[in-house]
């Protein structure tokens, strides 16, 4: 591969998915992975397979689907699974990624004094030994192994050179340098990478990678500084999601390299015109909103005050615009379809939006489309995306909404009556009062589906113009007790309860709220069932649920 | 002033307020200015007084209130008004800021080839001449004059040195270098500032300032690079709001300098413990949300996965945390008051939250507090903030909500009945159907208040935990025709219609939606009245409405 090529390693599905509330089902993960492949990323880190049986399955589905070549036109991305430097984790990661044409195992061990002492309780010598052992082991299974010294930015550089030398000797072909806590300044990070290039024996055999966090707002600058010092892989997430202030934003690095090509003189495989679409998909599935002033993908990123382009004097585009909206696939024309549009017109537009649906799926979406077109004169792209996503969520229903009736207002007795249909077709009805119509409706649902849970987040967006448009609601809930699905954190090794996101869309905002709550509850119920199946299922997956043993 | 002191020039109320939808009333601006003074900023750019009579009044109110010393403990910030390099703009800015103890006029003229040619239609020689004339004129009125060469980052450095030399000779004591289009990389920007320090005759007499935009996600890194090259003023906005991808975030620079004190070795006047509060205030008043993964002020910025701190092995705080939440005033304990809390307890808590209310105001808030406490067991800080803000908005009511009755659900005939009270106490009632309950209610309101408008934005947030909590709604609307209030853009000189934000809070989300819409409509009606008054009022303000003359 040419020296000026920068690989994009997308970790939206692993580090991004560790953000509070970003919990995705394996179907959602698959959809996002498909979109990332269309975007042209080189490596998809699809998850941490040892976290839970559900995470294992998510990675495996992506390896089998997105990890195998579908057409001659498009490169197939590598599919990567994260593993602690533990034999069990590495086995599990390998099982999950091996169906891919280009599987990769990514293993890591902390190298900073504070992490070695307080988290690992290991000496520097033990760390070097463990890195050698585990990279060798991973390499015995998989040709493509990546190693990360966790908290590298706060590690002793001399020690880091030794650890990296050991990883290279053991067969790692990518060495990733994370600023785990988002502490570095661009100069420090550039010096760190330059030092590694100069002082690590054998470094020319590996690709150097950078992985930054945005705690001080410097993730993009640090990543670019790393590239300038010689890194040729960037670890990024769409919209910069991730724990705390998140990871480096894929879109910012892609567009900085593109817009300032004259400075950086580097190539990437990214099709920038896919950026807006993937960004919205990730925001909708994770329920993590994008602020309007977010660079590249924020709603206002390309907006200028009204009128400024109408002035003849300013028609020279780059007076205030350094990037064209079209470059990131932002299509300003929003009116698409209406009441009289047929199934073919709908299919063509959905294709253009990147949804590849089967005939049956299209038929279902067309039904919702017609219902919507009766209520609303023009159907926009955002409406269509909401329809498709609403449908994707409904596909895994255990309880479905059969009827809702709400009375509320300033008289102070908001009342909701809910009728749900279970999988056997039986109807359940319940009425309840609450502090508001949503509270009343949720209490009525709780009266039917008795799963004690805490509502961690609740947000409503009117996606499209006008108040007559579809409203979208996302919720996130956590089960309170009972058979709670657990996930293991790759960093701490601790298990914690999974939380579940729900999504609903409707022109009636209260109906959308109830749909969202139901979809969250359905996911929770599905996860419980999955866990029960997994316990009865293959021993291989059970082995993945490692005890929190010292390494 | 000591060489290691970095001045914070906050332009939330000027450049930040130019973001689509951030349109603030002068009461809101005053509240934000008070909060910025508590935060410890050195200069408040309060607006562009020549934009409209409303903007003029907003700056003047801040100059009279926040610009004069209130206590010996706190420094009084400079109050700055923006002016194009035009005599009329400078006159207007001076009239607006002169009541302040430390008034400043900030004037600017573009220096990049593309701006000089396509926007100004001026030769470089004409630009230098105009800068000399207008800085001299501003200096004849006001001791403290700041000059900015607009689009400096794309200007010819040699030309820039000449322009800046001229500005210094004419009496400018602050020279601000803007990367107007957010195009620079940190290295470029550092080199630009270093070049100015080395090559501009007389530069030692002025304070050098940097003003960056975040189009490529590099605003904070560029600002820090500028400081390292010698700048001692940073122009920033709270939450990084501003046109397109916004300005440099105040909170990121403050916390980078604080957290990496060892590297930067610089001082500021910022009280970091005020950051969270000011951030929320700005988000609530502007209606511009903050994404959860926003550095420093995002909801997740300090969040770790559940359980990680409970593990004895990880009790060493800085394993994953480089900043303490307390440093930015993030108080994790949320439960505050309940049904049995008295007026005194409420006052004490509101004081702690930074609200200084009169006895009458407190009495009003206490009434709402009691009503809320009847519905909800525990009242959190966020609930209290919502109550106060809801009340602030209601203070300017022309129409108030007297009653609302809503029926909706899956039966498909969402109906709302609205009863409004006008300023004369007369009641108006209207019923309407819509695509959903909000659409129906807005149609009913429109039936009473006949002001054709376009709803540009609509968002709902459940601010507090649990679905029984207060829901907050923000809207933004633009009048469609009639006597539309206009504002002049400082950059393009064009006028465009103002848009108006509205805010409502209630446990019933539909009630909150109607309150928000009403508050937006009330603001619009107030602005119309203000314009009529202004036309009858002082000639001085009328002079501010400059024709779009060539400079």
Image: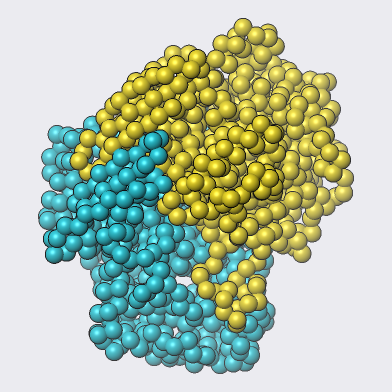
Chain colours: A yellow, B cyan
Residue toward you, B269 or A242: A242
Q: Quadrant of the N terminus of chain A?
A: top right
Residue toward you, B293 or A157: B293
Q: Residue at x 12, y 55 (%)?
A: B359
Which residue is at the far front? A340
| Displayed quadrant of residue B91 | bottom left
In percent of width and height, residue A139 lies at: 82, 24
In percent of width and height, residue B24 lies at: 36, 64
Residue toward you, A219 or A299: A299
In this rendering, the answer to whether A256 lies above or below B513 is below
Q: Residue at x 58, y 50 (%)?
A: A340
Residue toward you, B210 or A334: A334
Q: Residue at x 40, y 39 (%)?
A: B412
Q: How many marks?
A: 0
Q: Residue at x 20, y 57 (%)?
A: B428
Query: Does any portion of residue A34 appear in the rendered image?
Result: yes
Query: Does any portion of residue A219 appear in the rendered image?
Result: no
B321 left or right of B537? right
Q: Quadrant of the C terminus of chain A?
A: top right
B84 left or right of B151? left
| Displayed quadrant of residue A396 | top right
| Displayed quadrant of residue A80 | top right
B530 left or right of B374? right
In this rendering, the answer to whether B454 lies above or below B204 is above
In percent of width and height, residue B323 lies at: 47, 43
In percent of width and height, residue B432 lies at: 31, 50
């Amino acid at each position: 591969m040419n020296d000026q090529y920068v690989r994009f390693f997308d970790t939206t599905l692993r580090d991004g998915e560790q953000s509070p509330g970003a919990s995705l089902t394996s179907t959602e993960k698959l959809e996002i992975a498909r979109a990332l492949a269309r975007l042209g990323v080189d490596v998809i880190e699809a998850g941490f397979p040892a976290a839970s049986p559900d995470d294992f399955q998510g990675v495996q589905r992506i390896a089998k689907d997105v990890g195998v070549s579908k057409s001659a036109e498009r490169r197939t991305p590598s599919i990567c699974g994260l593993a602690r430097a533990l034999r069990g984790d590495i086995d599990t990661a390998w099982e999950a990624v091996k169906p891919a044409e280009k599987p990769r195992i990514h293993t890591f061990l902390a190298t900073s004094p504070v992490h070695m002492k307080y988290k690992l309780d290991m000496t520097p010598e033990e760390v070097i030994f463990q890195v050698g052992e585990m990279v060798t082991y991973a390499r015995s299974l998989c040709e493509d192994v990546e190693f990360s010294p966790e908290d590298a930015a706060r590690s002793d550089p001399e020690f880091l050179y030794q650890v990296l030398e050991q990883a290279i000797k053991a067969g790692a072909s990518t060495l990733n340098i994370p600023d785990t806590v988002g502490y570095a300044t661009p100069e420090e990070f550039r010096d760190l990478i330059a030092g590694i290039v100069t002082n690590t024996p054998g470094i020319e055999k590996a690709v150097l990678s950078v992985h930054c966090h945005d705690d001080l707002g410097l993730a993009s600058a640090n990543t670019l500084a790393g590239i300038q010092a010689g890194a040729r892989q960037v670890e990024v997430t769409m919209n910069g999601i991730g724990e705390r202030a998140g990871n480096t934003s894929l879109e910012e690095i892609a567009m900085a390299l593109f817009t300032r090509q004259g400075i950086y003189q580097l190539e990437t495989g990214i099709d920038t015109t896919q950026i807006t679409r993937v960004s919205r998909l990730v925001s909708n599935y994770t329920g993590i909103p994008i602020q309007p002033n977010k660079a590249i993908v924020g709603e206002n990123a390309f907006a200028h005050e009204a009128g400024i382009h109408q002035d003849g004097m300013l028609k020279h585009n780059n007076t205030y615009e350094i990037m064209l909206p079209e470059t990131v696939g932002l299509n300003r024309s929003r009116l698409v379809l209406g009441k009289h549009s047929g199934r073919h017109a709908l299919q063509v537009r959905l294709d253009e939006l990147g949804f590849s649906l089967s005939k049956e799926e299209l038929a279902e979406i067309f039904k919702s489309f017609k219902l919507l077109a009766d209520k609303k004169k023009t159907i926009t792209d955002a409406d269509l995306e909401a329809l498709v996503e609403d449908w994707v969520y409904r596909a895994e229903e255990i309880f479905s909404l059969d009827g809702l009736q709400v009375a509320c207002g300033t008289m102070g007795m908001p009342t909701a009556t809910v009728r749900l249909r279970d999988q056997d077709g039986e109807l359940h009805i319940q009425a309840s009062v609450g502090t508001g119509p949503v509270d009343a409706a949720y209490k009525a649902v709780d009266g039917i589906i008795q799963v004690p849970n805490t509502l961690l987040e609740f947000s409503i967006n009117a996606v499209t113009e006008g108040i007559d448009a579809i409203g979208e609601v996302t919720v996130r809930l956590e089960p309170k007790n009972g058979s709670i699905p657990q996930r293991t954190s790759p960093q701490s090794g601790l298990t914690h309860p999974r939380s579940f996101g729900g999504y609903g869309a409707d022109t009636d905002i209260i109906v959308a709220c109830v749909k969202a709550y139901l979809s969250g509850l359905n996911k929770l119920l599905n996860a419980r069932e999955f866990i029960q199946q997994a316990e009865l299922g293959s021993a291989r997956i059970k082995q993945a649920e490692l005890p929190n043993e010292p390494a």
